[in-house]
Amino acid sequence: MILLDEKTFKALFKEWYPVLCRYSQKYVADPGIAEDLVQEVFVNLWNSKDTIELESEMPPYLFASTRYNCLRYINRNQKEAKIIGIHLEKIEDSFDENVEYQQLEKLKKLFEAVDQLPDKTRQVFRLSKLEGLTYQEISEFLGVSVKTVENQMSAALKKLRTEMVTKQDSE
């Protein structure tokens, strides 16, 4: 179990605040709002330091909390929700059903191929492509060198290209 004293909290804040702010900006474009949302994560963490029980490392908790705050902010913001709804309607209206189906099938095959990657390679790929983290952020998060992240990503992309071409040829 992780104990959170003042020294540990300050070290976590110093190391992860800038990373989480950049991560938050992938959800909310305004840097000020992104910083506020990340600050809220740390305030909540400090306020619950006596009752929080984490069995694993802190970074996954911090990323999940930041993502949750961002999504909650987006949901609360009615104006943005209206704009997103209008854009979604326009996008849905403009899709040719056949093209959409083909794209969904390709996407499904891609996710199946990603699931077949080795654990570390799959983890690096998902953190980069789905979570939008930089190689440096992934390196810090996983505790490996940036070069290792680059090698894992290169292996993932090579394997996925091969898989997608093989599946396309078999159709």
Image (tube, grey):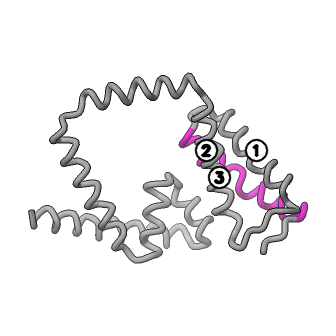
Mark 3 or 2, closer to the camera = 2
Residue 19 is labelled as 3
> Which class describes the residues within 10 Å of circle 2: few (<14), some (14-19), or many (20+)?
many
- Residue that appears at 47% across and 23% down: 83
Relative to 82, is 66 on the left or the right? right
Which sits in the foreground, 86 or 149? 86
Query: Viewer-nearest of labels 1 and 3?
Result: 1
Highlighted magenta segment, given as a residue range: 5-27
Main SS category, magenta section: helix
**Quadrant of the drawing holding the C terminus:** bottom left
The one nearer the camera, 56 or 129, is 56
Residue displayed at 74% across by 68% down: 54
* Residue 39 position in % (x across, y down): 76, 44
- Residue extending farthest bottom: 118
Residue placed under numbered mark 1 in the picture: 39
- Element type at mark 3: helix
Q: Residues within 10 Å of mark 1 (few under 14, many from 20)?
A: some
Q: Foreground residue, 18 or 160?
A: 160
**Mark 1 residue type:** Gln
Q: Is residue 117 left or right of residue 56?
A: left
Q: Residues within 10 Å of mark 3 (few under 14, many from 20)?
A: some
Q: Are marks 3 and 2 in contact (CB under 8 Å)?
A: no
Mark 2 or mark 3, which is nearer the start of the sequence?
3
Q: Position of residue 148 (x, y in %)?
A: 49, 73
Q: CA distance from mark 2 to mark 1?
A: 11 Å
